[in-house]
Each structure stands twice: as C-alpha cells, then as structure tokens.
Amino acid sequence: MNKLPEHPKDFDTDWLAEALGFQVGDLEHFDFSPIGTGQMADSFRLELGWRDHIDAGLDAPQSVVAKCPALDAQSRETGRLLHNYEVEVKWYQAFAAAAEVRTPHCYRADIAANMTEFVLLMEDLAPASQGNQIAGASDEDIQKVLLELANLHRVKWQDPSLETIEWLNYSQGNREFIRAFVPQSYDAWQARYKDRLDPEILKMGRALADRFDAYLEPRAAPQTITHGDCRLDNVLFSDAAGRAVIVDWQTISAGPAMGDVAYCIGTSFADAHARADKERDLLTFYLQALHSADNPSIDYSLDAAWADYRYSAFSGFLMAVIASMLVERTDRGDEMFAVMAERSGYQALHLDSLALIG
C-alpha cells in the first residue's frame, strides 16, 4: 500500500497487521465502527480477527482505535492550516511513550508530506468511558484530570529545549491567525449564541475581542508542554489503575501551564457557583501534584499560579469562539461550545479577568 490510508475503509489486513507489529497474513479480518465526538478528526474502533496461531501464541490486541483526518472538508482544512494533525502525530512519535501523563499507547503514528493525510493506531481503552462535556464532572474526576496535567507539565517545566522544537511552537504562528480571527468573527459568533448565553458573558466577550492585541502580549508565566484542549470530551475515565486518560493531542504546544489548568477547571463544572467555591482548592491540589517529584526547576507559588490562573480564565471561552467557527457544525457541537463559553465566561467574570489585561 503506497498511499497512506486515511480511513478504515482504505485499510487492508496486511497493512494493518504490519502497522500493529505483526506479519503479513497474521490478520484474517477486521470490522470498524465510529466512536467519539471529535469534530476536527474522525475516530473508529477496529475489531480484529487474528489467525488461530496468533491468538494462541501472542499478546495480540482484540481491538484498537484508529484516528484519521476528518471527512468534512472545513474541519480537514482547519486541521492542516493550524497544524493540528501534524502536532498530534509528532507528540506520539516523540514524547508520548516516555511521558508521565496517562495517554493511550500508540502502535503506529504516520503523516503524509502534505501534513493532512495521517493515521494513528492506538490502544483501545474500553470499557473506560468518555467524559461528557455537556454534563460536567465530579470533583473527584476533575482531580484525576489535574493529576495527569501535573504529570504532563512536570516533565519539561521551564525547559529551554522547548524553544528549539519547531512543531511545539506552531502556536506562535497560529497566534497571528487567531489575533485577526477573533475580532473579525466575534460578531458572527455572538449572533449564533445570543439567545443561548447570558448577555453579561457576551458583553465580556466583546470587550475581550476589542482588547485582543493586549491580551495576546507575552507574559512571564512558566512554560512547559501543554495539551491545549483539556476538556471532558478529551478524557477517558478510567483505566485499569483508576487513572484518567488524556486523549486528542491536536493542540499540544509549548505554553503556560495555567492555560490547561484554568481551561480544565472552568469548563468541567456544571454549576458556576460550585466552581467558584472549589477552584482555589483544586489549584492547590494541582500544585501539590506538580511539586510531588524532586524537580528543582519547579518553583511556583500559589499566589503566582493564582494570578496566572485568573489571566488564563479566558482559555475555554476563546476555544469555544474559535473552534465553533472553524469546524463542521453539528447540534451537539453547538451545545458543547455554548456550554464551554458559558462556564468559562462565568469563570472570567467571577475572577474579574478583564481587569488584568493592560
């Protein structure tokens, strides 16, 4: 097979067997079905039928998950333009196996030279259940996610080598696209959601769009590897060890740790008052996990983290604005983005985050 297959219908048994580390002829058949709620890419569960000698003698997976480019043309072009497909493949190629964060084992990660056609073959973590962004999560589950974020952030905390890894710094180029996109698209986004969201949130969003150049000015916050989209739909609960599993690494970059933390906490609470009551305690929990390993490079106080957290409270809101206008539109997607904007909007209002923008 010369061309990289980009959908399970294009796979054949010999290519799939070799991609999973077996020999041509070892796989007899496979079936596939769509899974997940992602809009930037498409995911499938592959049920595998091995030859008798493989099932009897080797630890062959009975199912795997395949992730492929979106069939929707708009989502696919966005994935190419913002390097979403490229950075996820390179995360699995370069870092995932050695990282402390719990993420699926990856059998194969390939991407074509056009950085659009790609395929990931990953561990199937069923019966772990996908988080539900619309429903929200319990305090215990949010802590599990924060623990994995601490595991991720700790590894390359303030590591100067991050500046030398080109694909971890695409966000700097994307920033220029976003700098123009948010002010230009905010009116259309507001018109879409004006009957769904609190007018105070929409007013705050308008003020943020008007000050967006100032908001994007660099700040002296600790840099590390960040996930960039750590919402409940991108988490599985839980694996055999009871851990949360972080998936969907299409927005990974070098960036400020509090972007992930504020995004996770802000978008995960169904009740805004419960979030306001608990977020400082959850931030303390994250910092304790971050400092749990002997890493002298980590010197991050609660006061400093809280200031960065307040500034980062717009993260979930901005993702809702940007992504909703760039990917395939669905009924669930509209409600999911509305929920994210609502929760993060109240978070930014409660924390008076606009006051921090110069």
Image: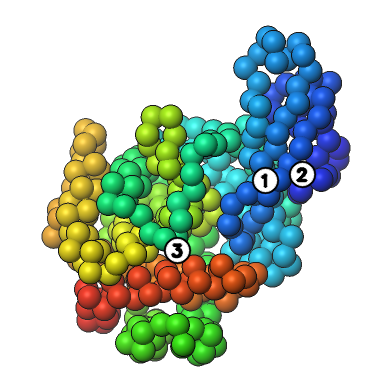
Picture residue at 49% right of the left edge, 39% below the top? 128
Q: Which element carries disc 2, helix, strand or loop?
A: helix
Mark 3 is surrounded, within 10 Å at the Cα level, by few (under 14), some (14 to 19) or many (20 or more) other residues, namely many
Q: Tell me the quarter of the picture where residue 327 sits.
A: bottom right
Taking the image as shown, residue 346 lies to the left or right of residue 173, namely left
Picture residue at 43% right of the left edge, 42% below the top? 237
Q: Which element carries disc 3, helix, strand or loop?
A: loop
Label number found at residue 8: 2
Q: Amino acid at mark 3?
A: Ile
In this view, the residue in front, 162 or 340, is: 340
Q: Earlier in the sequence, mark 3 or mark 1?
A: 1
Tell me the residue that label 3 is attached to: 134
Residue 106 position, x and y percent, is 58, 35
Q: Which element carries disc 1, helix, strand or loop?
A: strand
Q: Amino acid at mark 1?
A: Phe
Residue 281 position, x and y percent, is 17, 54
Q: Tell me the quarter of the picture where residue 318 sits.
A: bottom left
Picture quarter with the C terminus: bottom left
Residue 98 position, x and y percent, is 45, 32
Picture residue at 73% right of the left edge, 67% below the top? 73
Q: Are marks 3 and 1 in contact (CB under 8 Å)?
A: no
Q: Earlier in the sequence, mark 1 or mark 2?
A: 2
Q: Amino acid at mark 2?
A: Pro
The residues bearing labels 1 and 2 have C-alpha atoms spaced at a distance of 8 Å
The residues bearing labels 3 and 1 have C-alpha atoms spaced at a distance of 22 Å
Tell me the residue that label 1 is attached to: 44
Q: Are marks 1 and 2 in contact (CB under 8 Å)?
A: yes
> Vertically, is 50 above or below 85?
above
